[in-house]
Image: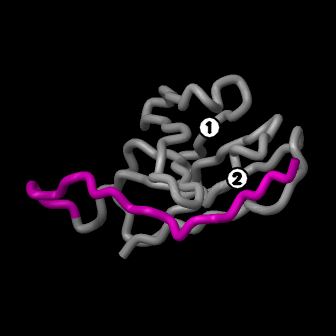
Amino acid sequence: QVQLVESGGGLVQAGGSLRLSCAASGSIFSINAMGWYRQAPGKQREMVATITGGGSTNYADSVKGRFTISRDNAKNTVYLQMNDLKPEDTAIYYCKADIKTRPVTVLTTWIPYWGQGTQVTVSA
């Protein structure tokens, strides 16, 4: 089995910074794309930032210039550095990773795994 465990959420004042981490563990053969998503109360889950296995990144317009996604392939970990946080960034943040698990066969495909979520609250 595979687990994704997030950490780094919390309460911060507007203009502050937080760094989220998400570590994948278990019977992992390979990880492709990884990303961060968020869901605010009463809203649908939305993409925040993604990073491919090759390091290409993509950001939601609302976080461009403020958030930076990165990954450490040796540690199976993805990070989200969040700067200049705003009250509208308040949400539960989830990490996602597309993973091939062991044992690998000709039928093995990428499966999306999600973390349990970490709360980020930004006060005005």
Q: Given the image, on which type of amino acid does mark 2 rest?
A: Thr
Disc sitting over residue 84 in the figure: none
The residue where tag 2 is placed is 90
Q: Quadrant of residue 67?
A: top right
Residue 95 percent location from the top left of the image: 52, 55
Snapshot colouring: one colour
Q: Residue 87 at what x, y percent from top left?
A: 77, 46
Q: Is residue 34 left or right of residue 118?
A: left
Q: Is residue 108 above or below residue 62?
A: below
Q: Residues within 10 Å of mark 2 (few under 14, many from 20)?
A: many
- Residue carrying label 1: 69
Q: Which residue does the image show at 55% across and 40% down from the upper left?
A: 48
SS state under label 2: loop
Q: Residue furthest bottom?
A: 1
Residue closer to the observer: 81 or 55: 81
| Residue at 10% across, 57% down | 107
Query: For the residue marked with disc 1, what is the amino acid?
Result: Ile
Q: How many marks?
A: 2
Q: 7 or 100, which lies in front? A: 7
The mark nearer the N terminus, 1 or 2, is 1
The boundaries of the magenta stretch are: 104-124
Alpha-carbon span between mark 1 and mark 2: 18 Å
Q: Is residue 14 above or below residue 22?
A: above
Instruction: State left or right for residue 61 relative to residue 11.
Output: left
Q: Secondary structure at mark 1?
A: strand
The image shows residue 13 at horizontal and vertical percentages of 90, 50
Which quarter of the figure is the N terminus placed in?
Answer: bottom left
Q: Is residue 97 magenta?
A: no
Question: In screen coordinates, is 28 left or right of 43?
Answer: left
Queried whether the magenta region covers residue 120, the answer comes back as: yes
Q: Position of residue 114 (x, y in %)?
A: 44, 62
